[in-house]
Amino acid sequence: MTTSRENGSTGGGTAAAPRTLAEELRARPDDALADLLRARPDLLSPVPGDLTQLATRAATRASVVRALDRLDRFALQVAEALAVAPDPCPYGTLAALMNGDRPDDPRVTAGLPRAVTTLREAALVWGGEDRLRLVRTVRELLAPSATHPSPTGLGPAVIEVTAGMSPGRLQQIIATAGLPATHDPVTAVAALTDLFEDRGRMAELLAEAPAESLTVLGRLQWGPPYGTVTATPAPHLRWLLDRGLLLTVTPGSVVLPREVALHLRAGRAHRTPEPVAPSLTPVTEHSDRVVDAAAAGQAFTALTTVEELLADWETAGPLVLRAGGLSVRDLKRAATRLDTTETAAAFWAELAHAAGLLASDGDVDERYAPTPAYDDWLPLPAERRWQHLVTAWLAMTRTAGLTGEKDAKGRMLSALGPDLDRSPAPEVRRRVLALLAGLPAGASVTEETLLTRLRWERPPRAAAPDAPEDTRSRLARWALAEAELLGVTNRGALSAPGRALLDAPDKAPGLLAPLLPEPLDHVLLQADLTAVAPGPLRRPLAQALSVLADIESKGGATVYRFTPESVRRALDAGRTAADLHAFLTAHSRTPVPQPLAYLVDDMARRHGRLRVGAASSYLRCDDEAVLGELLADRRSAPLRLRRLAGTVLAAQVEPDALLEGLRAMGYAPAAESAEGDVVISRADAHRTPPRTAPAPVPDGPPVPDATLLGAAVRAVRAGDLAATAERKPAAAPAPADGGLPRTTPADTLATVQAAVLTGAAVWIGYVNAEGAASQRVIAPIRVEGGFVTAYDHTADEVRTYPLHRITGVAELADGVV
């Protein structure tokens, strides 16, 4: 014998079964109502006036669709089975649909009560265990029709398909099926339905079927149940049509009736019920120390990547497209600069934007540039900078993985542009990390294993076989890849700081700090004009070295190459040869190679011998022979040089063009000011005005907190009390339509004054200044000056009402309040 809990019932004892969803909600305790509003926060906007309004709102299509999207696969399978079951459906019938004729699957038997309880708590199912009812809107969404199958693959029932069939055709079908003739279509349909639901008689009927007919039924039994036939069907199809095993929907279109399909399926609504979440196996074990160390190294790389991107954009930020976002060319340039893919470059840009470190400057010639918050972020310890980035990542709804795809209108989606927000992204990221956190430290599973579990927890909506992957699965794939880039995971396993992000975010930096590599203050200079940094460098050293040399390769060790152009760049920035020699000697663990010393001295000797200034532009040099050499060089023809004096040449191009032209010819000119001083060509760092980080796009209404839930439940209860409280019989008849009470002003005043003396509560009708009518239960405290002051049970507070706005009053039955 099973208990009511085992059978999925939340009712108790001999209590009368609810007749409506509102009655079932009324019987729930306050904490159960709060759970419903927490699970379906859209029901709170605005707060329902009473439980009838709450039940009505819970049955609206938009709210039901959102609730169905949050069911796990087995709860959804149970709802789908109820949609093809009789209404109301006894619990035993539902269990038979889930198990079929085979022996009960213990996993299904154990999981079914939980699934029914889940549906009941979400207000998608109501009624006692002998009369389970789906909310009408749920049935409309999940039940099959003449042209649209159920998610179970079942088609409509015989009674639904034969609704427009002629009585003569019905009689032909039942006669061919071996049934006696009936007097009307209703009994004919009932007889055919009884035949299809009788296992023994159906077995006898199908035993006579041609093999080709059984093959057709086998192809249709698990769905889709529709097919097409010609005007002159083949004999094996005619055999099925004549006996109603296939019924005509439209000319040339047939359907397999639900009852026939259930017989072929041995009574099962689903081919494979999935009562248990797929396990996260097989598990690959890694050393947790190795995972943490490698993840920390990647976290440091993430920080340097963001710094490198923003350092590049602080002097030459990319233009903002007219429609918003980065151009394809600028994204490719960023990817080349970061030595990564375009998708990864888009992610780093989006992450910096979400963290408030990057924004558009808002100028007429609008560009992307670091924000003032970037200057506050840079001096922080590495672990704090990492925490800032990953916290922004967990909350951001921007999805860089969509970059390069096209929207519904065929427009290309660009990084930092519009339409990249996907509101479920934060929830998916956190769920992916939570599943990884449930594994042992250092353990990982394959991506497909993780996606299979996620699809069970939130089944994707049915789509065409050739449709692209569902959104949540794509978000999960991107979340896994991004977690690896950020050092939250490594080798697919969650790191110790990554685990802390979920439960104790403030502890994550402390766990990461001892794992981060210590920045170095030295490099190893080599004779081939390169320098090797055997690890991450301290920021001042890295910044100075990036001016003096070009990065040739990255990785565990970064290789810098010294070139004439890079040395000239350092000289242009105001460094002297003595400064560069001192810098290299101070920061190299190896002697400064002679080729590098010669390169610095040679570039310094040549640097500034030629001086370019503004006339249109001019060129001067103390060595007349150098100028003569320039004039004789054919490559100088585009500059249109002309000697003005022994040491001065004039050019008919701008100073910047003259500088570039001479450098292309192998010279090392320097720009000079109007006073004759060398101009230091150090690019200015550009910042945007103060900007706030973009707010994530919420996935529906926010989950209410405990305070709001408590207030909402009290308000709904009070409103329900006002709407359903029993009243004392009145001399005048109550409104026929169940509307507001109506009494004369004198009777209203007398009843309210009497309630003040007795302390009783009364029921009133009230129309506010905007003309909105409502009914309330109040306990009058005093009446004076045309106003009644009372404790309003509906609003749970003391309020004052003008007597002339009270439409009527009625006393409540004893013991109601």
Image (cartoon, grey):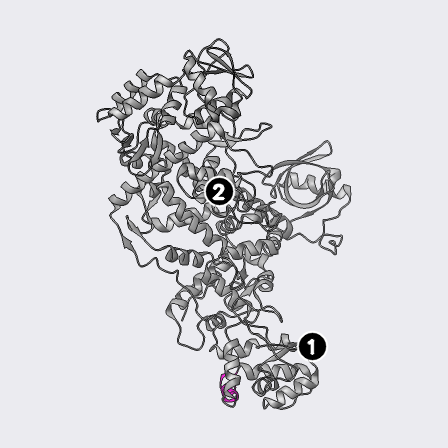
Q: Quadrant of residue 565?
A: top left
Instruction: Tell me the amino acid under the disc marked 2.
Output: Ala
Q: Is residue 184 above or below residue 745?
A: below
Query: Which one is in front, 712 or 454?
Result: 454
Asked whether, in this view, residue 775 is left or right of residue 475, the answer is right
Residue 256 belongs to magenta span = no
Q: Does the magenta-highlighted stretch encompass residue 202?
A: yes
Residue 68, x across and y down, in percent: 53, 57
How far from the left and from the top, in percent, is residue 55? 59, 55
Q: Which residue is mark 2?
A: 706
Q: Is residue 180 above or below residue 350?
A: below
Q: State the SS at label 2.
A: helix
Residue identified by numbered label 1: 164
- Which disc number belongs to residue 605? none
Nearest the eye: 813 or 283? 283
Toward the left, the furthest residue is 590
Residue drawn where x is 66% and y is 41% of the image: 755
> What residue is rendered at 64% in x and 37% in y?
790
Q: Is residue 564 left or right of residue 16?
A: left
Q: Nearer the viewer, mark 1 or mark 2?
A: 1
Would you place residue 465 above or below residue 656 in this image? below
Name the residue rendered at 42%, 51% in the picture: 477
Secondary structure, magenta segment, majority class: helix
The Cα–Cα distance between marks 1 and 2, rounded to whole angstroms, is 54 Å
Specify the farthest residue to the front.
Answer: 632
Q: Earlier in the sequence, mark 1 or mark 2?
A: 1
Q: Is residue 537 visible?
A: yes
Percent across and percent down for residue 651 are 53, 18
Q: Please report the bounds of the magenta region as a residue range.
A: 198-206
Q: Is residue 680 visible?
A: no
Q: Looking at numbered disc 1 in the image, what kind of residue is underneath it? A: Gly
Q: Position of residue 463 (x, y in %)?
A: 53, 61
